[in-house]
Image (spheres, helix red, strand yellow):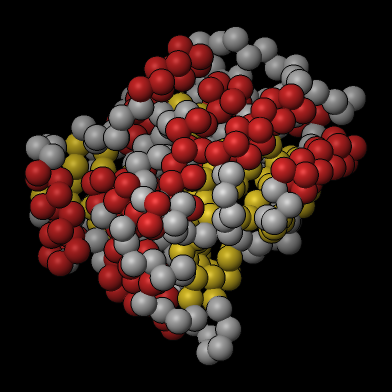
Amino acid sequence: MDLEISTVYASAVDAINNERADIKLWMPKRVLFTADAIKEPFGQKIYERIAKLNLPVEVLKHNRITGLRGETDRETYKLAKSTLAIVNAPEGAYKLRPIPPSADFQFHLAEGCPAHCQYCYLAGSLSGPPAIRVFANLPSILYNTTRYEQLNKITSFEASCYTDPLSLEHLTGSLSETIQFFGTRSFSHLRFVTKFDAIDPLLKLDHNDRTQCRISLNAEIVSRRLEGGTPGIDKRIKALRKLALPKEQGGGGYPIGVVLAPIMPVPDWKDAYGQLFQLLSQSLNFPCDLTFELITHRFTPGSKDVLLGWYPNTSLEMDEASRAIKKNKFGGTKFVYRKDMMSSLKDFFEKEIKLKFPQSKILYWT
Ligand code: SF4
């Protein structure tokens, strides 16, 4: 059986997610600066921003972040997710890794994210309590990317593998700093993706067409049930429109992208995703440089364990028996949808995009 997932969606998580109708900018309950981070000029800039917001700040005498563990997984999750730590990225951050099919290389402005998506992909990639760590040595992290540039060929850099960079922008300014840096490069492109909508600080930046801003979207039912702490789909679509509108019309004039992820065959999925495409095409009713990335839901044994620790009452379907197994090149196991379901989904999404956004490009399906 490889058809619609008839998961019981009415659950306690609805109560949490219904609160998001009025998502405001995230404010941590605790802000920590490590001894090294506060010495960095960019760390100082973050300190000034945070001080203006009257948030409780502790400047540590050492570089260790402690006090993130509660008595249960759930308590640890809550403590960590309400803590913002400003730290220096370790030496390893200067050795960039490829990140196909998204970009040539990944680099990081921060690790962790204040939202509460019950399928969060960070569960499989970051270890330990999910605190939010922002890097004070950002200028040297940015400069380091130039070592990976190639002459006469564009090298792309992805900045959202370990965080949602826009979710923290009001506290750090890191994304603006990064966009402006890439605006000065001739052979590098920056890509980032977000589920947040506070894009105003990005609109006036000199990006020089070197940054592609992508917004992560999903069917309303998936987003409402599983993406706690994020702005609604309608708000994200408005933000995407504004990012793409020409500067003379009050927009950011950015190349844009839509990341549809994680695609899930929820009940009536064709209608649910059809409505999303409808909203999107009404909003992007002007010529724009647009790409799509299409990512179906998957999980690993490790990410499932972590997610069930964080969200024990989740309605997210993670039933190994209804999935196909995919091995990666290191022998790791992922559970993906079965072949016939994958084909129906792929066929539907490709046809809709071709019909509604004939000028756009699909970068990949996975
Ligand atoms: S917005 Fe992205 S990084 Fe943040 S919780 Fe959701 S899936 Fe995870």
**In the drawing, does residue 341 fall left or right of residue 242?**
right
Instruction: Locate residue 363, reporting x and y percent.
Output: 69, 58
Residue at 76% x, 21% y: name it: 268
The residue nearer to you, when weighing 118 against 190, is 190
Name the quadrant of the N terminus: top right
The extreme bottom residue here reads: 151
7 up-or-down from 336: above or below: above
Instruction: Locate residue 304, reporting x and y percent.
Output: 61, 34
Instruction: Locate residue 157, reporting x and y percent.
Output: 50, 68
Give the quarter of the image for residue 203. bottom left
Residue at 81% x, 43% y: name it: 351
149 up-or-down from 70: above or below: below
217 up-or-down from 148: above or below: above
Regarding residue 18, the answer to whether it shows in the image is: yes
Residue at 52% x, 51% y: name it: 214
Regarding residue 309, the answer to whether it shows in the image is: no
76 up-or-down from 5: above or below: below
The residue nearer to you, when weighing 363 against 112, is 363
The residue nearer to you, when weighing 182 against 209, is 209
Count of numbered badges drawn on the protein: 0
Residue at 57% x, 34% y: name it: 119
Instruction: Locate residue 104, reporting x and y percent.
Output: 58, 70
